[in-house]
Amino acid sequence: MGKNVLVAYFSASGRTGRVAAALANAADADLFEIRPQTPYTAADLDWTNKKSRSSLEMSDPSSRPEIKSRVENMGDYGVVFLGFPVWWYTAPTIIKTFLESYDFSGKRVVLFATSGGSGLGKTRDDLIGCVSKDAEIVAGKVLNGSADLKSWSEQFTGGRK
């Protein structure tokens, strides 16, 4: 790719944030946290409550939670690793907000997630409509533990920053 690498992530509990920081370190990449304008509370994240904020967002295909800040230099990045916890077998809707906020033309977006048990499923299919046709979205993988992040990231970056 020859361009800089960004690791952007949304983390509700901190777990995805820890994986994202380790990945950014392994890939020699910049790190950006996707923070919701209104932070999630424990009650908001209660997936067993059909009226919780996360449940309502995930059941509404048009839901786009606002993001607190922006990546000012997105044009500088050729590869963006995009991380999130798996919610309802896919990405949280704030990930769609993030993808729709930038022009990813000509960029490679590599998905990664943390999960209590499910894989990425059809997440790539769910997100592909959020970027331009000439952006590449790679399904990536669930990174819960001891994966060799340096080797894994080099598949997508060619080992260059």
Image: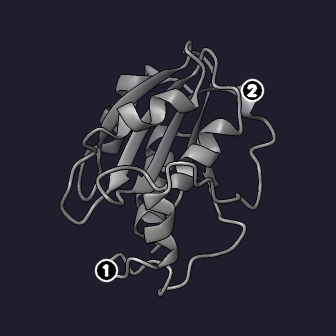
Give amino acid for label 2. Gly
Residue at point 41% right, 39% down?
A: 111
Q: Which residue is more in the foreground, 56 or 106?
A: 56
Disc 1 crowd rating (10 Å Cα; few below 14, some 14-19, many 20+) is few
**Of discs 1 and 2, which sits in the foreground?**
1
Q: Which residue is more in the foreground, 86 or 155?
A: 86
Q: Position of residue 22 (x, y in %)?
A: 43, 55
| Residue 136 relative to residue 99: left or right | left
Residue situated furthest right in the rendering: 72
| Residue 34 relative to residue 48: left or right | right
Disc 2 crowd rating (10 Å Cα; few below 14, some 14-19, many 20+) is some
| Residue 45 relative to residue 151: left or right | right
Assign the N terminus to one quadrant of the image.
top right
Find residue 75 and name its label.
Answer: 2
Residue at point 74% right, 26% down?
A: 75
**Are discs 1 and 2 less than 8 Å apart at CB?**
no
Q: CA distance from mark 1 to mark 2?
A: 39 Å
Residue at point 64% right, 18% down?
A: 105
Q: Position of residue 93 (x, y in %)?
A: 52, 53
Label 1 vs 2, first from the N-terminus: 1
Q: Which residue is mark 1?
A: 48
Q: Is residue 31 above or below residue 27?
A: below
Element on which disc 2 rests = helix
